[in-house]
Amino acid sequence: MTDPAAAGVVVGVDLGGTKIAAATVTASGGLGPLRSVPTPGQDGPDAVLDAVAGLVRAVVDAAGAPLRGVGVGTAGVVDVSRGVIVSATDTLPGWPGTDVAAEVRRRLVDVVAGPGPLAVFVENDVDAHAAGEAWLGAAAGADSALLVAVGTGVGGAVVLDGRPVRGAHHLAGEMGHVPVPGAEGLPCTCGRPGHLEAIGAGPAIHRRYLALGGDPAVRDTREVVALARAGEELAGSVVRAAATAVGRATAGVVTVLDPEVVVVGGGVANAGEVWWSAFESALRAEVVDVLADLSVRPAALGAAAAVLGAARGVHQLCSAPGGKPAPTTPGRTVE
Ligand SMILES: [Zn+2]
């Protein structure tokens, strides 16, 4: 029997636009203490990668064991087979084209357990979130799940048999760029008007509140949501419109995929009843009768979800036939 500590630890990393979080994760899902640092996104990719490596190093030091693998869930569209960023928004300038797998491996070469390259797995952060919820959270035990994440952006992920579906162009599940009624003419982060993210994301709620004559002293989406909960009419209608747009778009995706469960997470989705009731009634109003008992649940794992999901990707890599994969092919095998 091998001592697990001697074999090394696996660290999951959630790399978002404002914060990087990391922890050790065992093969059975045991989560170590979460540590986090701010994301130095405006300082460029090298600074971000240095911050990731520094945080992983701190986690490894605290665990007192060498490093066996790193799983990274990152903002942006990711080519999982190579660990390279395909595209990303302005929150991480210069991030597209970054070879996250190679750069993380290079920065951590001195703390690797045993011979051979460090196993590094990189995927989109919403995919990682979904993988975590499918493993140990709100979608545990389901054969298929749709995760909808509503925060700074609107993301989505489709999980089949515990693994996120990637798509032919690495874009599967990116619900934020689905056209949706109510968003006509509103600019999306991708540069096109009319997409879900332009009306449903957190920043869109604040923008729309101000554009419709809301109190200019209201500083952010959190304050708009607080006003909505307190019964302010304009704030309430803006939050409900945003939630309705997410609900309608979700109905479209659910109708195509027929998932066993829909899991909804992200900061905006946690805004409470004012958001949730508008979201769920819009979703249920749009789907056909066969889906009347569709299971719709809030995400269960909070900030740990993407850390767990990204780490699970590494555990799956390390347990794949043939052991540790070649550094250039950290992707999953396709059945
Ligand atoms: Zn868009």
Image: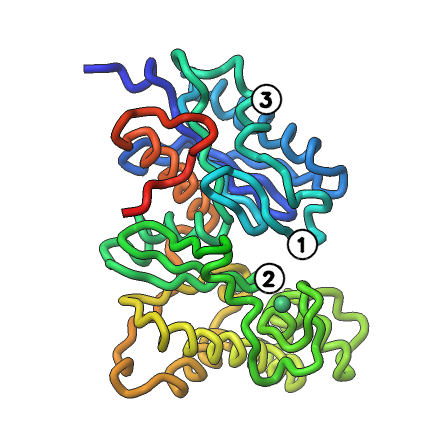
Tell me the quadrant of the picture where the N terminus can be found. Answer: top left
Identify the image quadrant of residue 318.
top left
Residue ranking furthest to the front: 168
Q: Which mark is residue 9?
A: none
Q: Amino acid at mark 1?
A: Thr
Residue ranking furthest to the right: 216
Q: Residue at x 50, y 38 (%)?
A: 82
Residue designated by label 3: 107
- Left or right: 100, with 172 as reference point: right
Quadrant location, ligand no. 1: bottom right
Determine whether label 1 and label 2 are within 8 Å by CB: yes
User: How many angstroms separate mark 1 from mark 3 (CA)?
Assistant: 25 Å
User: How many angstroms separate mark 3 from mark 2 (CA)?
Assistant: 30 Å
How would you rate the neighbour count of disc 2 (Cα within 10 Å): few for under 14, some for 14-19, many for 20 or more? many
Identify the image quadrant of residue 183.
bottom right
| Vertical placement of residue 115 versus 22, above or below | above
Q: Residue at x 29, y 71 (%)?
A: 295
Q: Amino acid at mark 3?
A: Arg
Foreground pick, 334 / 144: 334
Please tell me whether mark 3 or mark 2 is closer to you in this view: 3
First in sequence: mark 1 vs mark 2: 1
First in sequence: mark 3 vs mark 2: 3
Residue 302 screen position, x and y as percent: 44, 52
Residue designated by label 1: 89
First in sequence: mark 1 vs mark 3: 1
